[in-house]
Image (tube, helix red, strand yellow):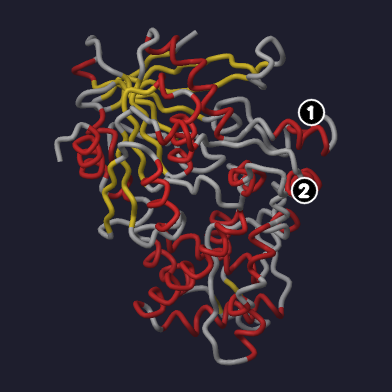
């Protein structure tokens, strides 16, 4: 059953599909996928090629656009667009603290979650493509983790692709999670230094907040234990185009006077809660390191282990001296599962995933080296989320891939400069640039 409705300038249709949980056993258990079809109102009756959008993440449902903002308006000039909620996200069969106990205990939950990586997502796409396009290949636009999925698509099922467009999402083909984070922490430190250069007053503000959290037990309105490490994770914002400005505004009014002395304001804590809670995207925390696992080596809480190699990120040591507090970036740590009420019941499940040694490859270097699908990728110079060196090495390993390396945008360039970014990638893929 489908529902069709209108928003300004577009016609939307809700689409639902049934796919195997494990594509290696197609007659076994099934799950549901949700996707939203979007077409420009003045083209609703036309036969158009399809563009599949794969959202960044992992763990996030597709954007809920109103009308046709950002890159969508440009895409709708020539495509019907399918905004897919990848398995476990959005309106697709959810995977969270409420639903995962239906699988059984932590061991059963961890086994279930091994089916929520890019290889399963790509096989989902191939399973639904005949129902959407009638069997014709489609163009895929992959943002961030969606780009990782697109490289997996080129490895597993290139026959399903007409064109592949990737924005900020070229993964290393062979790096272990440890390699990813060893490259990440120095990038994060550069982003923090750039933030403090822009807003030097934030050095003392961040130190004051960190000191308060080290000396007080702070609990946010939703029950989140607000630790100094959680505060440091606000550095995630620094990977976006406006992130430094947003962080500055967050820090400037953190305290209010109270009868008991200065305290973190309710307004600040409300904003902190929105930034820290994984209630809406628990898969991000659960499988984030697993998206880098491809062999018998466990991820073993890689970001936490590697962080110890960079002692400047230790908040207590920074405050004991006169060093600025360093924020962290796109890293998931075991303490998150102790702090966040949306994740606490899943701590053992996460530990079991971190200990797994039976991961399978996500990319096929030989097939990528023989690629015949037109591919274009935007690589953002000094991207905080995806290492540029890793991305360019992968670009060289995929036959025919054309890159646009730019420092005009940060990782969210497809949101900020969507029409220009999409125009440039389409021109590159079509050999028009």
Q: How many marks?
A: 2
Residue positioned 50% across, 29% down in the render? 85
Q: Which of 432/269 is in front? A: 432
- Between disc 2 and disc 1, whose residue precedes? 1
SS for tag 1?
helix
Would you say 187 lies left or right of 180 here? left
Q: Given the current orientation, which residue lies at the most extreme right position? A: 105
Instruction: In the rendered view, tell whether residue 127 sits above or below residue 64.
Output: above
Q: In which image quadrant can residue 214 be found? A: bottom right
The disc at residue 290 is: none
Across and down, in percent, residue 199 comes to: 37, 78
Across and down, in percent, residue 356 comes to: 76, 43
The disc at residue 103 is: 1
Q: Which of 92/211 is in front? A: 92
Q: Quick one: label 1, few (<14), some, or many (20+) residues within 10 Å?
A: few
Q: In which image quadrant can residue 133 be found? A: top left
Residue behind mark 2: 355
Residue positioned 33% across, 36% down in the render? 165
Question: Which quadrant of the figure contains the C terminus?
Answer: top left
Instruction: In the rendered view, tell whether residue 312 sits above or below residue 432.
Output: below
Residue positioned 67% across, 72% down in the render? 308
Q: Quick one: label 2, few (<14), some, or many (20+) residues within 10 Å?
A: few
Tell me if label 2 and label 1 are in contact, CB under 8 Å: no
The residues tagged by marks 2 and 1 sit, at their Cα atoms, a distance apart of 19 Å
Would you say 193 lies left or right of 71 here? right
């Amino acid at each position: 059953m489908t529902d069709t409705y209108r928003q300004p300038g577009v016609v939307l249709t809700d689409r639902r599909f049934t796919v195997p949980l494990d594509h290696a056993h197609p007659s076994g258990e099934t799950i549901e996928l949700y996707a939203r079809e979007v077409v420009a109102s003045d083209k609703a009756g036309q036969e158009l090629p399809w563009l599949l959008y794969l959202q960044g993440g992992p763990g996030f449902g597709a954007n809920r656009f109103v009308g046709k903002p950002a890159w969508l308006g440009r895409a709708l000039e020539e495509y019907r667009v399918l905004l897919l909620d990848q398995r476990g996200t959005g309106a697709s069969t959810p995977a969270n603290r409420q639903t995962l106990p239906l699988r059984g205990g932590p061991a059963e939950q961890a086994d279930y979650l091994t089916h929520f990586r890019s290889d399963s997502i790509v096989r989902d796409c191939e399973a639904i493509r005949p129902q959407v396009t009638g069997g014709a290949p489609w163009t895929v636009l992959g943002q961030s983790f969606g780009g990782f999925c697109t490289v997996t698509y080129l490895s597993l099922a290139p026959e399903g692709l007409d064109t592949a467009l990737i924005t900020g999402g070229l993964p290393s083909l062979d790096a272990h999670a440890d390699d990813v984070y060893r490259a990440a922490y120095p990038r994060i430190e550069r982003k923090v230094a750039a933030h403090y250069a822009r807003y030097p007053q934030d050095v003392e503000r961040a130190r004051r907040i960190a000191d308060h959290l080290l000396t007080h037990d702070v609990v946010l309105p939703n029950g989140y234990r607000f630790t100094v490490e959680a505060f440091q994770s606000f550095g995630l914002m620094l990977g976006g185009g406006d992130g430094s400005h947003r962080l500055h505004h967050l820090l400037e009014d953190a305290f209010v006077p109270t009868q008991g002395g200065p305290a973190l304001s309710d307004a600040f804590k409300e904003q902190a809660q929105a930034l820290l809670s994984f209630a809406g995207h628990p898969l991000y925390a659960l499988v984030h390191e697993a998206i880098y696992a491809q062999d018998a080596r466990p991820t073993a809480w890689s970001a936490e282990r590697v962080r110890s190699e960079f002692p400047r990120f230790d908040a207590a040591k920074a405050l004991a001296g006169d060093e600025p507090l360093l924020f962290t970036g796109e890293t998931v740590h075991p303490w998150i599962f102790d702090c966040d009420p949306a994740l606490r019941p899943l701590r053992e499940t996460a530990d079991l995933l971190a200990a797994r040694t039976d991961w399978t490859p996500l990319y096929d270097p030989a097939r990528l080296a023989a690629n015949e699908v037109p591919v274009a990728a935007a690589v953002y110079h000094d991207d905080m989320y995806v290492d540029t060196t890793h991305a360019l090495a992968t670009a060289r390993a995929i036959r025919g891939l054309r890159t646009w390396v730019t420092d005009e945008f940060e990782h969210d360039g497809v949101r900020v400069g969507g029409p220009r970014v999409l125009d440039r990638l389409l021109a590159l893929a079509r050999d028009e640039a």
